[in-house]
Amino acid sequence: GLRYLRHHCPCAHCTGSHGTPPQALPLTPSPFQLYQPALKMTSVEPVGNYAVRILWNDGHGSGIYSYDHLRKICPCPACQGSTAAS
């Protein structure tokens, strides 16, 4: 789902790679939030022949999702079997 994909954003802000705590979108929305618009992709752009950049309606768009990263985070049995074998 989109929330899962947004949660696994590989950018430095979301992963905490630049020395601050990770700021990834939580997998489960807060029950105390009064209103939160539905998460949507506003655009998907190719990055070379190895990745895509997803622009989200929450204003985030710095994550470059490499095809290797997408395969690694994919929860389906076929992808999990292929990553375990490599």
Image (cartoon, rainbow, N blue to C red):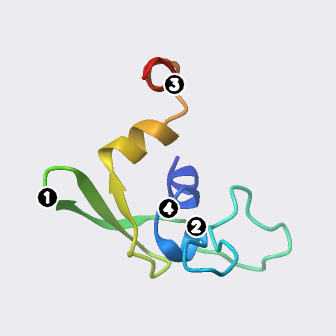
Q: Looking at the image, do the residues carrying marks 4 and 2 touch, with CB atoms under 8 Å apart?
A: yes
In the structure shown, which secondary structural element does the residue marked by tag 2 occupy? helix
Judging by the rendered image, the residue that carries numbered circle 2 is 15
Which numbered disc flags the more N-terminal residue, 1 or 4? 4
Which numbered disc flags the more N-terminal residue, 3 or 2? 2
Judging by the rendered image, the residue that carries numbered circle 3 is 80
Foreground residue among 86 and 47: 86
> Which amino acid type is marked by label 2?
Thr
63 relative to 15 in the view: left or right: left
Please state the horizontal and vertical placement of residue 12, each as a whole percent of the image. Answer: 50, 73
Question: Dot 2 surroundings within 10 Å: few (below 14), some, or many (20 or more)?
Answer: some
Inter-mark Cα distance, 3 to 2: 21 Å
Which numbered disc flags the more N-terminal residue, 1 or 2? 2
Quadrant including the C terminus: top left
Residue at point 45%, 64% (across, down): 40
In the structure shown, which secondary structural element does the residue marked by tag 3 occupy? helix
Q: Looking at the image, do the residues carrying marks 3 and 4 touch, with CB atoms under 8 Å apart?
A: no
Judging by the rendered image, the residue that carries numbered circle 4 is 9
Which numbered disc flags the more N-terminal residue, 1 or 3? 1
Residue at point 62%, 80% (across, down): 19
> Which amino acid type is marked by label 3?
Gln
Question: Dot 4 surroundings within 10 Å: few (below 14), some, or many (20 or more)?
Answer: many
Inter-mark Cα distance, 1 to 3: 25 Å
Please state the horizontal and vertical placement of residue 20, each as a whole percent of the image. Answer: 66, 81
Instruction: Identify whether 62 is placed above or below 68.
Output: below
